[in-house]
Amino acid sequence: MKTTVALLALAALAAGTAGAAALDRHVRINNTSSYDIIEFYASNTGSKSWEEDILGKNILPAGESVMINIDDGSGYCKYDFMAVFEDGDQVTSANNNVCELAEFSFTD
């Protein structure tokens, strides 16, 4: 009986952890501005520095969008975004809940 209770408790714990880990962190980034985005960063809100440029060698042209998986394996849902535009402007947005957010738009 103790083994059954322990196994049920373990199964419940695993299900709760798997539920949080299974949250969808895919976000469509829309560039509705007049300028190309040449760099895009997403770092969990608790981080003191930006992670690597998600676009890498690519850009996000004006008027285009891209689906990005923001999951960095940390289990976090809250991320800060930063876009760097071709004209040198930088736009940041803090506390974006990527577990609930389906789209995010950068505008002029």
Image (cartoon, helix red, strand yellow):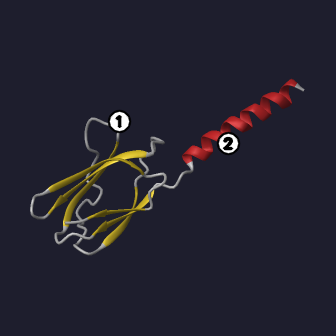
Residue farthest to the top, as pictured: 2
Could you tell me which residue is drawn at 57 percent across and 44 percent down? 20
Mark 1 and mark 2: Cα distance apart in space: 26 Å
Residue farthest to the front, as pictured: 108
Q: From the image, which quarter does the N terminus lie in?
A: top right
Task: Name the residue type under label 2.
Answer: Ala
Q: Which residue is mark 2?
A: 15
Image coordinates for residue 22, horizontal then vertical, percent? 57, 50
| Left or right placement of residue 3 versus residue 56 in this view | right
Could you tell me which residue is drawn at 67 percent across and 39 percent down? 14
Q: Secondary structure at mark 1?
A: loop
| Left or right placement of residue 79 versus residue 9 in this view | left
Could you tell me which residue is drawn at 48 percent across and 42 percent down? 75
Image coordinates for residue 92, horizontal then vertical, percent? 24, 51
**Snapshot quadrant of residue 43:** top left
Mark closer to the observer (1, 2): 1
Q: Which residue is mark 1?
A: 46
Looking at the image, residue 100 lies above or below residue 2? below
Task: Name the residue type under label 1.
Answer: Gly
